[in-house]
Image (spheres, rainbow, N blue to C red):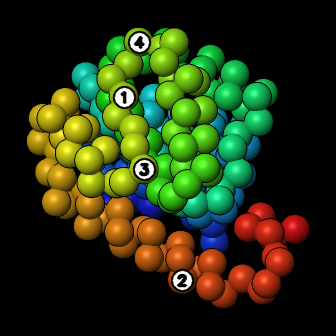
């Protein structure tokens, strides 16, 4: 069963079995977001040898600050070998390529299995080959549900309003 741990109109943090899912639709990634996800990851690793972390980023979402990226590496490094990580940077053109490159460079130094791309399906399928028991069809359906909920929330935002409510 999908368990939601945090939700705003522009992001959601959820857990499904041995998988942490963070879907982002316009929200900036702040240090508190990294800590929230890292705490959930630590909690799951107390019960499991390995887990997956899937981050879905919709087109145009802002990149984390360099400070936030450093914090992410510090929090991830001690358990990197126990993680299978997937990043789906959903979009086209320069934004998607730049976001994908930034992610690959940031994660490359850590010793973890990583799948990244601009489409969700290949990322989930790659992760499912590494994590026993991860059913790609189920994960894709859950991700599409979360994405649809975030898209609906985005459509309710007034034009020009930020995703953080500022």
Checking the image for residue 111, the label placed there is 4
In the rendered image, the quadrant that contains the C terminus is bottom right
Label 3: which residue? 118
Give the CA distance from mark 4 to mark 1.
Answer: 9 Å
Considering every residue shown, the one lying at the far front of the view is 93
Give the CA distance from mark 3 to mark 2.
Answer: 21 Å
Asked whether residue 22 is in view, the answer is no
Give the CA distance from mark 4 to mark 2.
Answer: 37 Å
**Residue 22 drawn at (x, y percent):** 49, 51
Marks 2, 1: nearer the viewer: 1
Q: For mark 3, give the secondary structure.
A: loop
Marks 3, 2: nearer the viewer: 3
Give the CA distance from mark 1 to mark 3.
Answer: 14 Å
Viewer-nearest residue: 143 or 5: 143
**Residue 92 drawn at (x, y percent):** 51, 58
Image height check: is 56 above or below 165? above
Mark 3 burial class by Cα count in 10 Å: few <14, some 14-19, many 20+: many
Viewer-nearest residue: 28 or 103: 103
Label 2: which residue? 152
Image height check: is 158 above or below 86? below
Q: For mark 2, give the secondary structure.
A: helix
Can you tell which quarter of the image residue 58 is in? bottom right
Q: Are marks 3 and 2 in contact (CB under 8 Å)?
A: no
Viewer-nearest residue: 136 or 77: 136
Q: For mark 4, give the secondary structure.
A: loop
Label 1: which residue? 114
Marks 4, 3: nearer the viewer: 3
Q: Are marks 2 and 1 in contact (CB under 8 Å)?
A: no
């Amino acid at each position: 069963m999908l368990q939601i741990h945090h939700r705003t109109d522009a992001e959601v943090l959820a857990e499904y079995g041995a998988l942490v899912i963070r879907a982002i639709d316009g929200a900036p990634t702040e240090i508190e977001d990294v800590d929230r996800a890292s705490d959930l990851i630590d909690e799951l690793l107390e019960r499991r040898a390995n887990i997956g972390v899937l981050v879905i980023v919709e087109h145009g979402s802002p990149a984390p600050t360099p400070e936030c990226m450093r914090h992410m590496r510090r929090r991830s490094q001690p358990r990197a070998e126990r993680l299978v990580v997937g990043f789906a940077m959903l979009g086209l053109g320069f934004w998607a390529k730049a976001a994908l490159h930034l992610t690959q460079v940031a994660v490359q130094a850590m010793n973890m299995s990583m799948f990244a791309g601009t489409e969700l399906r290949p990322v989930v399928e790659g992760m499912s080959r590494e994590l026993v028991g991860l059913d790609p069809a189920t994960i894709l359906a859950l991700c599409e549900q979360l994405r649809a909920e975030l898209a609906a929330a985005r459509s309710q935002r007034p034009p020009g309003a930020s995703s953080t409510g500022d």
